[in-house]
Amino acid sequence: MDIAEKVRQLPIPGAKRRPMQGMRRRRDIDLFENMLGTYTGGWPEMQVGIPKVDVIDHDDEILLRAEIPGVKKDDIDVSMTDDLVTIRGTAQQEEKREEGDYYYRETSRGEFSRSISLPAHVDGSKAKAKYADGVLELTLPKVQGSKRHKINISAQ
């Protein structure tokens, strides 16, 4: 249950005596959500927000997966500075309906950005990226000194 849903379930003081106050409060909550979007920074119509990310630390490389559904590959920008990866993008959605004399068209646009600190030093010049089915996958080879190695524990 998200925060907005919890707010909707809060009792409204005096609502039984003054039903219009309850209606106004519900309207204000809906207006607030539509103005600000979701708490992840996106547009409610598109559910664009901060991408969910998995960072997997393998022996020789770091695998980073970001869920970015509904965004075109050309609208995604990936950059690196030191051991920080930044994923930026723009999503656009257009909805069109025609019913008799009624014509409806709405365009929504949302932007997102997320920076992820990596757990090891990587060689950004050898990084590989692919995007399929709404998932961006980055393969980032570690530099020689950052590769994982085992430390043996001795008995005293």
Image (cartoon, rainbow, N blue to C red):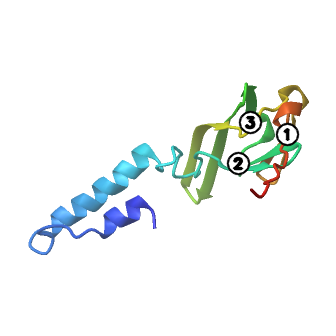
Disc 1, disc 2: CB below 8 Å?
Answer: no
Secondary structure of residue under mark 3? strand
Under mark 1, the amino acid is Lys
Residue 68 circle label: 2
Q: Quadrant of residue 20?
A: bottom left
Q: Residues within 10 Å of mark 2 (few under 14, many from 20)?
A: many
Q: Quadrant of residue 128?
A: top right
Q: Nearer the viewer, residue 23 or 122?
A: 122
Residue at 32%, 56% in the rendered image: 29
On the picture, is 119 further left or further right than 11? right
Residue 76 circle label: 3
Residue at 86%, 42% in the rendered image: 61
The quadrant of the rendering that contains the C terminus is: bottom right
Whether residue 143 is visible to the viewer of this picture, yes or no, is no
Residue at 27%, 68% in the rendered image: 10
What's the CA distance linking mark 1 and mark 3?
A: 29 Å
Q: Earlier in the sequence, mark 2 or mark 3?
A: 2
Callout in the foreground (1, 3): 1
| Residue picked out by circle 1 | 147
Q: As drawn, which residue projects farthest toward the left? A: 17
